[in-house]
Image (cartoon, rainbow, N blue to C red):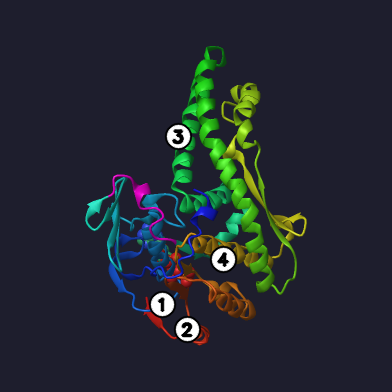
Amino acid sequence: MWLSSLIVLNRNIPLPSLKKISLTQFRNFDFQSFQFNAKVTGITGLNGAGKTNLLDAIYYLCYTKSYFQGREINNVKYDTTGFRIEGEFENETIVCKWKEGKKSIEHDGIVYEKVTEHIGKYSSVMIAPDDIELINDGSELRRKFMDGLLSQSDSNYLEYLLLYQKILIQRNAYLKQTATPNISHDLLDVYDEQLAQYGSYLIQERKRLSLQLPHWVQEYYGILSNDAERVGLIYKNNAEPEDIKEALHKSRRRDLEYKRTLVGPHTDDWHFQIGDNPMKAHASQGQKKSFLISLKLAHIKWLELLNKRPFLLLDDIFEKLDRKRLLKLFEMLEQFKLSQIFLTHTSEADLLETLQQFYKDIQIIKL
Ligand SMILES: Nc1ncnc2c1ncn2[C@@H]1O[C@H](COP(=O)(O)OP(=O)(O)OP(=O)(O)O)[C@@H](O)[C@H]1O
């Protein structure tokens, strides 16, 4: 389903709220519960106190995965074998458990058959220092980010993405394990047919996203940086939706040589630019940070058009932005409908001084 059909202009949808979170053996927490009773929650404490971990636990409840850790075992408190995160929302309780390689997600005591059933129910947007990797690292992170946006708006997209990835793994394993003279081209044809079927949808939806997202990013970047410069976000696909099968066919000789699938949406990239140059090499640290914040605000906008009210998770934002941009950011946040805002800072006084300019309903949690 595409966005335009999802823009149901219902401005009165209730804001989901997280009332309480209980963490068991999650990172540095043994067992700890936190009650939330305000629109804005400031989480304060010394370096290493667990502020980011608490934010990440909220993110986990929304997406059943950590924002920071790709490997679940890294979420488990040292010397233990599993963790549990329980979130009490307005009308329901979600429990995420992981133990010795097995993950389960419960909704009001009933385990979801598929974890994907939960995705899309609650949304959150994290803004964290690690986001810089989106610019500086390879294409995979950028693809993941954009795929995340599309998966939140369209359950077909998530389903096709997972199917595409499954077939791709099978095709690559077959290429790797089979000596070229023994390769069955009929079997590769079957894989290619499936990759083309799912892949064409992925490319088509990415293209649509690429028509909308850059405008928002430019708009927010302009406000944050006083229209300092132009930024760009360009989708680079290496095959057109209708041409994937042909592209795979053309690439088959090279695929056999390199023993992996070299074309298809899994190799696409999103180029981030400042002026006409790649952002990675040409933007200053401050410009990169402003761009990333603009990208995250565009994410919130995207969710808003889908009638979703995300939780905004701001990690270390006070340390990373100068005061002028920080105030601009809070000013800009006023235009979005957010469920709750959680932010971390080492200094409670500093946090309150800024927040009180914008919000009345503030809670502080000291770690
Ligand atoms: N799996 C784990 N088991 C136990 N402790 C962990 C685990 N993973 C991380 N930690 C600990 O969690 C702490 C880091 O927590 P976190 O990053 O949330 O701190 P923070 O309060 O955000 O710090 P800062 O102000 O420096 O950003 C570190 O002390 C780290 O050693």
Reading the image, the residue beneath label 1 is 39
The CA distance from mark 1 to mark 3 is 41 Å
The CB of the residue at mark 4 lies under 8 Å from ligand 1: no
Which percent across, then down, holds residue 100?
A: 29, 46
Q: Residues within 10 Å of mark 3 (few under 14, many from 20)?
A: few
Reading the image, the residue beneath label 4 is 297
Task: Choose the circle earlier in sequence order: 1 or 4.
Answer: 1
Residue 276 appears left or right of 361: right
Assess whether residue 259 is covered by the magenta stretch: no
Q: Are marks 1 and 3 in contact (CB under 8 Å)?
A: no
Q: Secondary structure at mark 1?
A: loop
Q: Residues within 10 Å of mark 1 (few under 14, many from 20)?
A: some
In the rendered view, would you say 165 is above or below 9?
A: above
Q: Are marks 2 and 1 in contact (CB under 8 Å)?
A: yes
Reading the image, the residue beneath label 2 is 359
- What type of secondary structure mainly makes up the magenta span? loop
In this rendering, which labeled residue sits more in front, label 3 or label 4? 4
